[in-house]
Amino acid sequence: MSAFKDILRKDNARVFLNPNEFGEEHMVGNKRMVISIDNNEMVEREKRRTAQGDLMSYRQGVFKETVLFYVLAQDYGPLPAVGRRLELDGKQYIISDAINEDGIYSISLEAQRS
């Protein structure tokens, strides 16, 4: 493993998901974890999906709530499967995307709300 990748892995916990920097405690499933919610990146990903024609139709009065968060792989456990249910801070979601980004998971959630 390169020295740069070692530095990145250490920075994942010390900086990116440090509660004194970008991380915040949330309930993920039934476990309290330090995560970082990134609403800006979720908006950008939704724009790309919309531009590619990946739209879902929704009934009047129903909207799609989306959330993207980052969590240390070592804290979360195995990368979750797309389509699986996940509770975040007491709200139910479906995992729409999950990527291992060198020791940090990027997990996208969505739910239909009224």
Image (cartoon, rainbow, N blue to C red):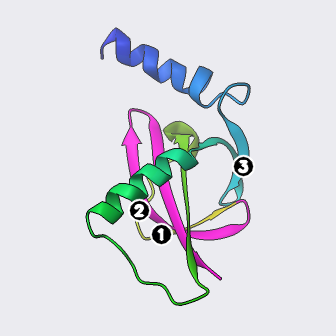
Q: Is residue 42 left or right of residue 93?
A: left
Above or below, comparing residue 34 to residue 21 in the picture: below
Badge 2 vs badge 1, beta-carbon distance below 8 Å: yes
Q: Amino acid at mark 1?
A: Arg
Q: Position of residue 70 (x, y in %)?
A: 53, 43
Which numbered marker is on residue 45?
A: none
- The residue wearing badge 2 is 81
Q: Is residue 47 left or right of residue 114?
A: left
Which residue is located at x 41 percent, y 16 percent?
A: 6
- Find the residue positioned furthest to the left: 52
Task: Compute the Cα span from label 3 to label 1.
Answer: 19 Å
Q: Is residue 78 visible?
A: no
Q: Position of residue 1 (x, y in %)?
A: 30, 17
Which residue is located at x 57 percent, y 28 percent?
A: 16
Which of the 4 quarters of the picture holds residue 21? top right
- Find the residue positioned furthest to the top: 3
User: How many neighbours does mark 3 have within 10 angstroms: few (below 14), some (14-19), or many (20 or more)?
Assistant: some
- The residue wearing badge 3 is 26
Above or below, comparing residue 67 to residue 8 in the picture: below
Q: Amino acid at mark 2?
A: Ala
Which of the 4 quarters of the picture holds residue 54? bottom left
Which residue is located at x 51 percent, y 19 percent?
A: 10
Task: Compute the Cα span from label 3 to label 2.
Answer: 20 Å
Q: Any magenta on residue 92?
A: yes
Q: Is residue 72 left or right of residue 91?
A: left
- The residue wearing badge 1 is 84
